[in-house]
Amino acid sequence: MKKILILGGTAEAVSLAAQLKDYPGISVIYSLAGRTRSPNLPDCAVRQGGFGGTDGLTRYLMENDIAAVIDATHPYAGQMAENARRATSKLSLAHYKYLRTPWSEPCEAPWIWAASSNDAAEKIRGKFNRVFLSGGLNDVAAFTALNDVWFLIRSIEYPSTPIPIQNFSHIKARGPFDVVGERKLMQENKIDALVSKNSGGSATEAKLHAAQALSIPIIMIDRPPPLGGVVFDDQAMLIDRLRQDF
Ligand code: NAP
């Protein structure tokens, strides 16, 4: 039996685990950071919580006799991706990276590109007054200094620590979202700019269509570059490749 560790926290990671769990000769362990109170889980072995950096992950892979790692974390989970690259390279293990296809920028409504959340804050400064931060709670600290701006902050969990922003309203909601609802939310809150990550996938794409329909500028935080592993944007192709390799 070859043990495969799936680094999860996305719908696609759950789906990959579900497809691989009964695969002959393979046993799957699904790993979560453990930040979400009621995460979607596949019906296979699950572990939760950080490994303790690259060294902790390397130790975990050795102690659990893992043969391969599928990094199916969110495209912006750069630290976990880097740790997976380093640990698998140290141990010469197979390393696959699943990455959703990014959304594409419409020619008729170009996005304002930002290299990071800090850069997105600079793009807001002096230009926008009521901004929708749609990318969760991880990076809200980047917007702390914008005291003249009011923010609508959406995340799938209530914040576990105070939100370090002066003027804001928080909503807890989990996708999928639809265009009608997103449009209503932005209109009701008089939003004049949307900050988004280029997450890809269908669950949270509606906000882009809603903003475009309302002529609300979209500040798009660019993706970090993929950090290693054999990269797939198609689950079936990744599974085919695993089938060949194991
Ligand atoms: P990150 O910055 O890359 O990771 C920070 C630390 O969290 C990692 O160093 C690791 O701790 C731990 N960690 C992250 N993913 C893990 C996993 N699947 N299993 C075990 N430990 C994990 O990640 P993040 O952006 O905070 O994302 C955390 C989780 O939320 C990920 O599972 C990701 O797929 C999911 N998520 C993220 C976003 C986003 O916008 N970033 C959106 C949706 C879902 P140690 O160093 O101690 O091992």
Image (tube, rainbow, N blue to C red):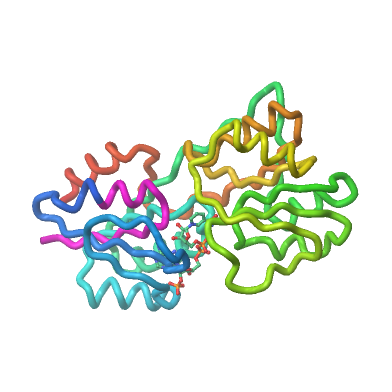
Check residue 93 for magenta coloring.
Answer: no
**Residue in front for this viewpoint, 8 or 64:** 8
* Rendered position, 246 above or below 239: below
Residue 47 shown left or right of residue 196 in the figure: left
On the image, which quarter does residue 6 sit in? bottom left
Q: How many marks?
A: 0
Q: Position of residue 84 (x, y in %)?
A: 40, 63
Residue 138 shown left or right of residue 119 in the figure: left
Residue placed at 40% from the left, 73% from the top?
49
On the image, which quarter does residue 239 sit in? top left
| Furthest-top residue in this view | 108
Check residue 14 for magenta coloring.
Answer: yes
Q: Position of residue 208 (x, y in %)?
A: 63, 35
Q: Magenta residues? A: 1-17
Q: Position of residue 91 (x, y in %)?
A: 30, 68
Q: Position of residue 176 (x, y in %)?
A: 48, 41
Residue placed at 50% from the left, 45% from the top?
175
Residue placed at 69% from the left, 46% from the top?
195
Residue placed at 17% from the left, 44% from the top?
243
Quadrant where the N terminus sits is bottom left
Residue 222 shown left or right of residue 44 in the figure: right
On the image, which quarter does residue 86 sit in? bottom left
